[in-house]
Image (spheres, coloured by chain):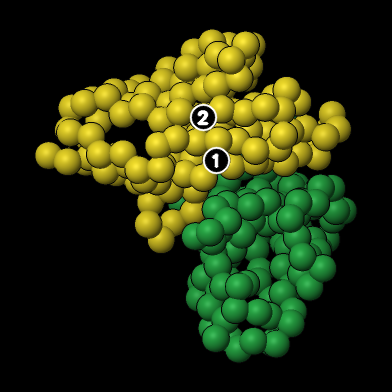
Chain colours: A yellow, B green
Amino acid sequence: QQQVKQSPQSLIVQKGGISIINCAYENTAFDYFPWYQQFPGKGPALLIAIRPDVSEKKEGRFTISFNKSAKQFSLHIMDSQPGDSATYFCAARTRLTNFGNEKLTFGTGTRLTIIP
Amino acid sequence: DSGVTQTPKHLITATGQRVTLRCSPRSGDLSVYWYQQSLDQGLQFLIQYYNGEERAKGNILERFSAQQFPDLHSELNLSSLELGDSALYFCASSVAGVVTDTQYFGPGTRLTVL
């Protein structure tokens, strides 16, 4: 019930195309859904995040779509660029108390490659 | 640069040994989290500290322990090391207590157990 299932494992998209990565979860206690971007040799960095009371959030070329009833959320990267080539992780947060006690459960990651 | 620092960057040691990984959170952040990233297990939450106290535990082995000091830096101690402990260990920090808290990750420590 704590799992977050992420697909695909790897994705190749042409420059200018749309990259789509999907995640699904079971635990209804998750209350916050961030996406992290990780470049080789670096730590994950927060890209964009959404709360379950919102169905979509857009920041620049990055959009999260959230379907609460289906327990699914996805990351869309519009006009994909070679610099977007990285590993992307979806995550879901469980807040165990109201203050300061939380866990992030990560998906297994998607290696995105943008080709010219 | 996330503002989270981790030392050392690389660590090579032998089975059975003990190592200590160090993390300094971003200025003002009270929470520290430790994660293990390996090829077969992905990114796994190990443990969280908030203002010096343990707050949440994940998949942390009994051979592993952590603490957060009064100056808020944290150390992760790994003992009786096994080959399978080879992984990237990340520390993250957050302000904690705010709904839209973000966890900021450090650059990681790559541990190789030979």
Image point 44% across, 35% down: which residue? A7
Q: Position of residue A73 (x, y in %)?
A: 52, 22
Q: Which mark is residue A85?
A: none
Q: Position of residue A110 (x, y in %)?
A: 41, 42
Residue nearer the viewer, B104 or B60: B60
Residue at image mark 1: A107
Residue nearer the viewer, B2 or A98: A98
- With A83 as the anchor, is A100 left or right in this view? right
User: What SS does tag 1 mark?
Assistant: loop
Where is residue A98, by image quadrant?
Answer: top right
Structural crowding at the residue carrying mark 2, measured as other residues with C-alpha within 10 Å and reported as few (<14), some (14–19) or many (≥20): many
Tell which residue pokes out farthest to the left in this image.
A116
- Type of amino acid at the residue the image marks with label 1: Gly
Could you tell me if residue B90 is visible in this image? no
User: What SS does tag 2 mark?
Assistant: strand
Q: Is residue B74 above or below residue B14?
A: above
Image point 77% across, 65% down: which residue? B61
Residue at image mark 2: A23
Q: Quadrant of the N terminus of chain A?
A: top right
- With A87 as the anchor, is B44 left or right in this view? right
Q: Is residue B80 above or below residue B33?
A: below
Image point 40% across, 37% down: which residue? A8
Mark 1 or mark 2: whose residue is earlier in sequence: 2
**Circles 1, 2 touching at the beta carbon (< 8 Å):** yes
- Type of amino acid at the residue the image marks with label 2: Cys
Image point 80% across, 51% down: which residue? B57
Looking at the rendered structure, whether the residues under marks 1 and 2 are on a common chain is answered as yes
Q: Position of residue B45 (x, y in %)?
A: 68, 51
- Chain where mark 2 sits: A
Where is residue B97, by image quadrant?
Answer: top right
Where is residue A18, by image quadrant?
Answer: top left
From mark 1 to mark 2, how far is it between C-alphas?
Answer: 7 Å
